[in-house]
Image (cartoon, grey):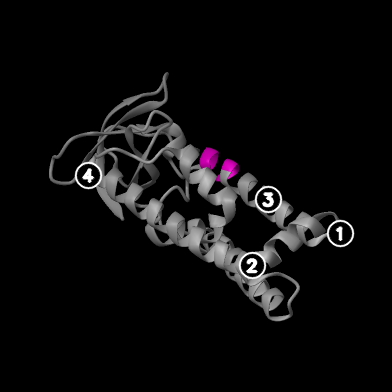
Amino acid sequence: MRYLGKIIKWNDEKGFGFVVPKGGNQPVFVHVRGFSNRQRRPLVDAIVSYELGSDVQGRCCAEDVRYSDEKQTTIELRISIVPMLCALLFSALLAVMVWSKHIQMVVAIAYLMVSLVTFMAYALDKSAARSGQWRTQESTLFFFGLVCGWPGAIFAQQLFRHKSSKREFQTTFWLTVLLNCGALMWVLSPYGADVRLLLSGMI
């Protein structure tokens, strides 16, 4: 969910300031990294739209900040579609592998169940960010993604617009995706024969 507000304070030297939402509620912290357009100098009284997120300490802050006279470009829309395509293609590939008996059903069930848990974790964290309640640690979200929940994480990020524009988070998140996919490829290789045998015994 995007909010409309106005920059009420900005420190050029330190690169941060505060945005007050429309209606005059509690000011929200904003760092220069939170702006989608860093070529433009933030000015006091500038009207902006933003999403609520959190910093590394779990404090509420503005993310994906855009000036009111800026429109989301086609390129930005395409970029947001790419993660969804990755999750959909992976899910389809997993289904085909289960159908062709190249992988056990329990693996697909694990991805599905953990993805659902991960989706709910993101939903709860987004709700907590809006209400200022206790937040889910980013390390927990990374862990869910690493242990097969990353498809659900991608759907949650795009649906709730949560953590999708935070570059540091996205870098670590996609690293967990690569690690998970690498582990799956290892299980499917000759080196993972013992693991596959173990999974067969669980069915």
| Span highlighted in magenta in the image | 167-172
Residue 37 can be seen, yes or no: no
> What residue is shown with label 4?
131
Marks 2/3: CA distance? 12 Å
Q: Which residue is pictured at 13% across the width and 40% down the height?
A: 24
Left or right: residue 31 compared with residue 153: left
What kind of secondary structure does the magenta stretch mostly adopt?
helix
For the residue pair 15 and 109, the one nearer the viewer reads as 109
Q: Is 128 drawn above or below residue 2 in the view shown?
A: above
Q: CA distance from mark 2 to mark 1?
A: 21 Å
Marks 4/3: CA–CA distance: 33 Å
Report how far apart the C-alphas of labels 2 and 4 lie in the structure.
Answer: 34 Å
Q: Amino acid at mark 1?
A: Pro
For label 1, the residue is 190
- Check the image and report above or below for 104 versus 68: below
Assign a secondary structure to mark 4: helix
Residue depicted at 56% across the width and 67% down the height: 109
For the residues labelled 1 and 3, the Cα–Cα distance comes to 20 Å
CB within 8 Å, label 4 to label 3? no
Q: Which residue is mark 2?
A: 90
Q: Is residue 109 magenta?
A: no
For label 4, the crowd category at 10 Å Cα-Cα, with few meaning under 14, some 14 to 19 and many 20 or more, is few
Q: Which residue is label 3 attached to? A: 178
Q: What x and y, as percent, mark residue 122?
A: 40, 52
